Image: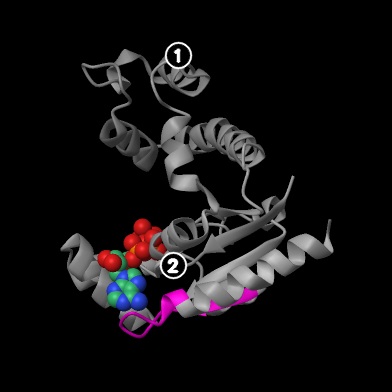
Amino acid sequence: MSLVVAITGGIASGKTTVANLFHQHFGIHLVDADVVARQVVEPGTQGLTQIVEHFGRSILNPDGTLDRAALRKKIFSNSQDKEWINNLLHPLIRQEMQHQLQLSTSPYSLLVVPLLVENDLQHMANRVLVVDVSEQTQINRTMTRDRVPESQVRSILKAQAEREARLAHADDVINNDAEGAQLLSQITKLHQKYLALCSENR
Ligand code: ATP
């Protein structure tokens, strides 16, 4: 498989914005852990079949899709159920991410994994690119984007890795604090670096 670069960062750091720019400007193949996490429980999947066997059909919406709110409620109140669902879904998500990376035809691929450090998934990539912003930027951008109060953003921040812990795993860093943050210029430099690494490894 070609070079895989993991993109990670805390809430509203700009992972999606950065990944989309790599895709739009350079045609780089993206695999997004959040998208994959939904795909592995779509109707007809082994994931959803097992969830229904475990929790019963009340875990489904009338249209046969997973009732995420009902599932969240169950695992919030029962730690054994939470462990069960993590043991089921984490391997399925990893397998599907591998599969989608193998379909890549671009010189390198980007794997967007918000909780890369928290879930110890660094081994899935050759390099880690951290999109780094201050806590204040995270709070401002989440409040604007999601229309939520500051207290809610702070509780999400508490549940995620600390900025320094994430940066400790970084091979490359994009600083995304400034408005606009000259993202395209930062991304172009990294793109050239990744292409050079690809040709070194050929
Ligand atoms: P999450 O993990 O919470 O889904 P994310 O890390 O993927 O978020 P984005 O959705 O890309 O982050 O960005 C968060 C918000 O900040 C979006 O509304 C986006 O438009 C805005 N944003 C990102 N980068 C910048 C920037 N450099 N200047 C101004 N706004 C930005």
Q: Are discs 2 and 1 less than 8 Å apart at CB? A: no
> Can residue 52 be seen in this snapshot?
yes
Instruction: Point out the quarter of the image occupied by ligand 1.
Output: bottom left
Please tell me whether residue 73 is drawn above or below residue 138 in the rendered image: above
Q: What residue appears at the point 54 percent right and 62 percent down from the top-left corner?
A: 7
Q: Amino acid at mark 2?
A: Gly
119 to the left or right of 143:
right
Q: CA distance from mark 2 to mark 1?
A: 34 Å
Q: Earlier in the sequence, mark 2 or mark 1?
A: 2
- Which residue corresponds to the image point at 32% horizontal and 14% vertical from the top-left? 57
Q: 195 or 153, which lies in front?
A: 195
Give the crowd class for mark 2: few <14, some 14-19, many >=20 residues within 10 Å: many
**Residue indicated by mark 1:** 53
State which quarter of the image contains the C terminus. bottom right
Relative to 26, residue 57 above or below: above
Task: Tell me the magenta residue range.
Answer: 172-184
- The percent coordinates of residue 123 (x first, y second) are 72, 54
Q: Secondary structure at mark 1?
A: helix
Q: Cβ of disc 1 within 8 Å of ligand 1?
A: no
Q: Nearer the viewer, mark 2 or mark 1?
A: 2
Viewer-proximal residue among 68 and 78: 68
Q: Nearer the viewer, residue 14 or 103?
A: 103
Q: Quadrant of residue 98?
A: top right
Q: In which quadrant will I find the N terminus?
A: top right
Q: Which residue is mark 2?
A: 10
- The quadrant in which residue 128 appears is bottom right
Say if residue 155 shows up in the picture.
Answer: no
